[in-house]
Image (cartoon, grey):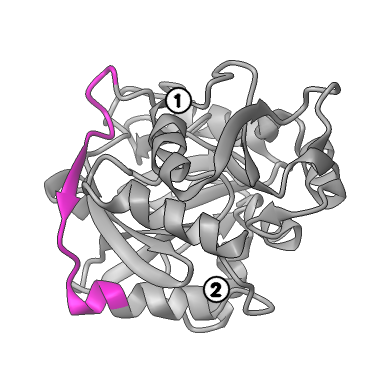
Amino acid sequence: MKVALATFAAIPDGGYEAELLRSSLAPLGVTADSVVWDDPSVDWSAYDLTVIRSTWDYVDRLAEFLAWADALPRVANPAHVLRWNTDKRYLRDLAEAGVPTVPTLWDPADLPDWDEFVVKPAVSCGSRDTARWKRGVEDDQARAHLEALRGSPAMVQPFLSAVDTEGETALLYCGGEFSHAARKSPILRAGAGIEGLVTGEDGRGAITPAVPTEAQLALADQALAAVPGAPDLLYARVDMVTGPDGTPVLMELELTEPSLFLDATPEAAETYAKAIATRL
C-alpha cells in the first residue's frame, strides 16, 4: 500500500513529522512518500490515500489548493472539511453551536476597546501576518495592520493574559480518539509587531508535553462534535487557552495541515501510523 504525505516545495521531504510517519508506517507494510501538492508530474491515483500534512503555502493560493483537494481520489482529512477549515470564519459556526471560543470581531470599522488585542487574517497559518497590539499605545500601527488585511477578512480578538502565563494547550486527536496533548509557549510578543512565520528557532512556540484537564477534554469533544457533517477525521488539533473566568476557550480547530507534535509523546507517531494503515 502507498500513501502520499502532501507537503509544499519549500520542504519537499515533509520535515521531521513526515519522517516519523514514514518510519512508523514501514513496519505496517505501508510505503509513505512525501509529495509536493502542486507538482504537476504527480499521479495522485497511484496512491491509496493522500494525507494532507505540510501544505503551508496554500494561504496564497487557497482556491487552487481546494480545487486540487477536491480532485484527489482519496484524501484525509476530507476535502469538504478542508474547505470549511481553511477560512477561520468557521469559528463563527462553532460559536453559534455553543462552543466557547475567543470573542472575535470580523472586519471591524475601528479598533476594539480591549486593552490588548490580536489582529490577523482569516486565511493564515504559522501566525503569518498576525500581531498583538496595545490600545492607546500602538493604535497607528494596529490601524495600519487592520487596513492592510481588510476584506480578507481581518479578524480581531482580545489578547488573553493566560497565553503569556501558561501558554496555549493543544489536544491532538487521531481517528476520533484523544491521542496526546502539548503546551505551546507564547508566539506573539508585545511590541514586536508582525514577526512572520513561526519556525521555533527564535524561541516562540516551544512545545512541551501536557496533561489535559477534564474541562479541556470536554471542550475539545464539544468542538469536534460541532464540525458540520460529523466527518470521519483522521487527525485533529484543538488549540485552547484559559479564559478570564478560569475555564478553557477555543482558539482554533486545526483540521487541515496542523503540526501534530509527534515528538511530544513517544507513541504518537505509531498511533497515527496505525490509524492510516487501518483506513487503507
- Near-viewer residue (83 or 191): 83
Q: Position of residue 215 (x, y in %)?
A: 23, 78
Does residue 79 sit above or below 34 in this rendering? below
The residue that appears at 71% across and 49% down in the rendered structure is 48
Magenta stretch contains residue 203? yes
The kind of secondary structure element at disc 2 is helix
Residue 78 showing in the rendered view: yes
Q: In front: 135, or 256? A: 256
Checking the image for residue 94, the label placed there is 2
Residue 21 lies in quadrant = top left
In-front residue for pair 139/59: 59
Helix, strand or loop at mark 1: helix
Q: Which mark is residue 15?
A: 1
Left/right of residue 19 with respect to residue 232 in the rendered view = left
> Taking 170 as reference, is 250 above or below it?
below
Instruction: Write the residue at 19% across / 66% down.
Output: 212
Left or right: where 126 falls relative to 169:
right
- Give the CA distance from mark 2 to mark 1: 31 Å
Front of the two marks 2 and 1: 1
Image location (x, y in percent) of residue 8:
63, 25
Task: Tell which residue pokes out farthest to the bottom in this image.
Answer: 98
Of labels 2 and 1, earlier in sequence is: 1
Q: Is residue 229 left or right of residue 98?
A: right
| Label of residue 105 in the image | none
- Magenta highlight range: 201-217
Magenta stretch containing residue 76, yes or no? no
For the C terminus, which image quadrant? bottom right
Which three-letter amino acid code belongs to the residue tagged 1? Answer: Gly
Amino acid type for the residue under numbered disc 2: Leu
Number of marks: 2
| The image quarter in which residue 204 lies | top left
Q: Is residue 24 above or below residue 18?
A: below
